[in-house]
Image: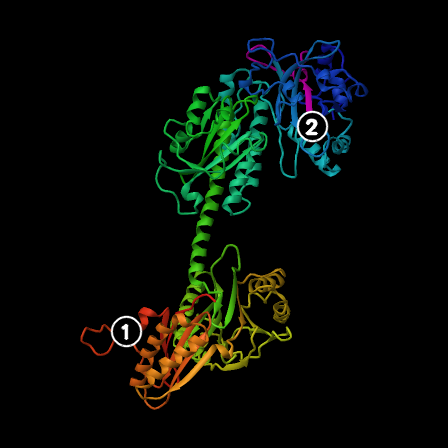
Amino acid sequence: MDRGTERGAPSQRAAGDGAAAAGRIPLAVVVVDRDGLVSHWSRGARRLFGTAREEAVGRPVVDLLPVSGALPEDDESAPYGAYAAYDGLGPDLESSLDGRLFYPAAGRARLTAADSDRIDVLWWAYPLVGPGAERLLVLAADAGALRPEDTGAGVGAGDGAAVERIAPGFALHTDFPGAEDLARRLPEILPSMSVGEGARIVAQVLELGYPVLEFSQNDRVPVTPDWGVPRRAERKARQERAAAAALSGEPLPQDAGDEGEDLEYAAVRERLEFLNEVSGRIGTSLDLSRTIIEVSRAVVPRFTDVAGTYLREQVVAGEGFPDGVPDTTTMWHRVAVEHTDEPGRWDDVVPVGEAMPFPAHTPFFQCMTTGDPVLVPRISEQMGHMIAAQFEKRDIRPLITGRSMLVVPLKARNVVLGFMILLRHPERVEFNDMDRVTGAELAARAGLVLDNARMYTYQESVAETLQDSMLPHIAPRMSGCDIATRYLPGTLLGRVGGDWFDSVKLPGSRTALVVGDVMGHGLNSAAMMGQLRTAVQTMAALDLPPAQLLRNLDDLAQRLGEHYLATCLYAIYDPIASELEIANAGHIPPVLVRAEDGRSDLLDLPTGAPIGVGGVPFESVRVRVAPGDRLVMCTDGLVEVRGEDIGVGLATLCESAAHPAASMDDACDTIIRALNTRGGRKDDVALLMARLNGIEPEDVAEWRIGHDPREAGRARAAVREQLHTWGLGSVADTAELLVSELVTNAVRHSHSRPIALRLVRGETLLCEVDDDDHTLPTLLSAGRLDEFGRGMRVVSTLAREWGTSRTGSGKTVWFELTLPHR
């Protein structure tokens, strides 16, 4: 640690500093509170400015650090060349001291101290954000320490100035008694900082060679002015060479006699560290929206004060890769705006979500078509007016005029996905050519991250579309029962799986309830699931018994391939008979929750073998149920956790299923919460819950009809009377006509067994006619003179829905009519 000497006359300081070790200068640390008063004044500040700590603390900072102005451009006494704002030296210190700047800044100024000549000072100002009273941290150093006059350590500059070479890797040290003392004092200066954090920051200051301040856990905001740069043209050429070499990984060029090369090395190193830091902060997820926000926030406020991100329409929509070069018709969506201005200032003028094209004469169009960054040192009044013309009834000129602008393309695979508009405050140093290089590299990395998120979003959308197309959209109410379902993908990266559920409407007001699980994951499992689900629906429509349906499904799976295996649970609920008929093919058993006492139990079913094993019989079990009972069917992904006995999950399923709930959806959510929070789940989950409401006996009417053709008239009369009893006289005429057609057909084609006619009142009016003939009726194209073929055409035209199915003794033909709201 270089302690330095007590501050004296300028000539004495120069001599003392000349004896100091090369590459070390003392730092002054000053903290200003929100009232503009000094709250911390370090020993280095006392040495540099000549005021004791007891006299400085509590006084207005502008009285202690009066700014008399920067050196002029043509002042050849200036040892480091130009001082204009364009040269990267930033605003004056006074702007930071009086609170006009709200972002980190750095620069160079001549300060007037008591009883001394002007002091040439390098300074850094960091606004402090937090609950404490501190508002500003100012670090300052005597530029004379870099100009030994009486030693041979300097290297002659082209303009006659002698500048001490600072070897890369050396650090600018503070003049505190020790790093430990500085680490201990930082928590007093900066709110919410531990001693450990302070020690880490001190180590960074000593290692990196320029001030470092961390506002949060991850945000580091160093600011390094371009010290020692002789003239603009020379600096520009060197910056481009240094930046290109650093970004390509080549050694930095060593120009003999270049007095600023080491400091420029530090500047390039800082920019590389900034790019590395940004790379670590973006792309933490594959979520496109989150990635957009990360990219925008990564550059504010350290690199720019305003960052607006625009993406092409296809990228925002999660569609395929955009084709072709953008033109004046291409729509660009504003997806993010980050800034350091007061809250809400940009929201009304440039709201997020707006889509707009850009004309050919704008710098934005130039950037998007060439794929190269566009630098505008200052937005003139004319350019501000030209840009504002794109915003109807909104004057954007006050927000952009006078600011420095850099437009960088967001590219991937040589295609422009979007661009970022970066703006700096008028008081802040303009973007320069090195910023252009930095911005281009930043945009290239951001473009790759955005493209990864875009591709993932696109693939996820395809997967979800496929999954949604395969999973049925089950009606919440079926005849005699209410149904609720849930589906959860196994992993975020594979939203397509082989789990499914289904419900199928059957004759006789019955409902088939199905849950299945194809072994494996991914598209192959999903494809098999789609085939099996379609087969189940087809066979259920034939009204096959559960055991026979599983037998046929097993045969189908073996024909599809030897590697096709699945489990399946198939149940038929008869709400009139209050009965469940269930068959199991290697699936976990369902849970039945009794409405009478709230007890829940796993149904004891023959396990059976998985679908696709072959040669194994399946058995059906009949279970009596009562109105209000709930049947819970799920796949093993819900109850099975790696390393845990499945019995634990089944017990939790029973317990959570019995929990009272206000609705079916709430009951499903209760089960999911109880079982999905245990961790370790990697399989898909399909859950189906059915509340078995039943159908009351008074809502069912049945008749037996003989084979006499005159029975059709008796059937019409019985139906009309029953409908008036139920208060459904408005549909009596239609129902009477359709019943007459079905009974007439049954009388004509049946053999010996009596014909059964049944009416069921529910959400709709169901009419069923059952006979012993196995020939199913079909729609015919009857001519004007044809005697037969018109009856089913009438039924098809007037009924809400109709159908037919075979039974063990013949067939059933049915139709439904929509009922008026009761």
Alpha carbons under labels 1 and 2: distance apart: 86 Å
Task: State which tag comes first along the sequence, 1 or 2.
Answer: 2
Image height check: is 406 above or below 767?
above
Q: Could you tell me which residue is drawn at 62 percent across and 31 percent down? A: 221
Residue 642 in sight: yes
- Label 2, secondary structure: give it: strand
- Binning the other alpha carbons within 10 Å of mark 2 as few (below 14), some (14 to 19) or many (20 upward) gives many
- The image quadrant where one finds the N terminus is top right
- Binning the other alpha carbons within 10 Å of mark 1 as few (below 14), some (14 to 19) or many (20 upward) gives few
Query: Disc number at residue 135?
Result: 2
Q: In which quadrant of the rendered view does residue 504 lie? A: bottom left
The answer to the question of whether label 1 and label 2 lie on touching residues, with beta carbons closer than 8 A, is: no
**Is residue 145 located in the magenta-colored stretch of the structure?**
yes
Query: Disc number at residue 779?
Result: 1
Magenta residues (range):
134-161
Q: Amino acid at mark 2?
A: Arg
Q: In which quadrant of the rendered view does residue 147 lie? A: top right
Foreground residue among 801 and 731: 731
Residue 26: x and y in percent read 71, 22
Q: In which quadrant of the rendered view does residue 321 lie? A: top left
- Label 1, secondary structure: give it: loop
Foreground residue among 644 and 379: 379
In the displayed structure image, the side of residue 197 where residue 568 appears, left or right: left
Residue 121: x and y in percent read 66, 17
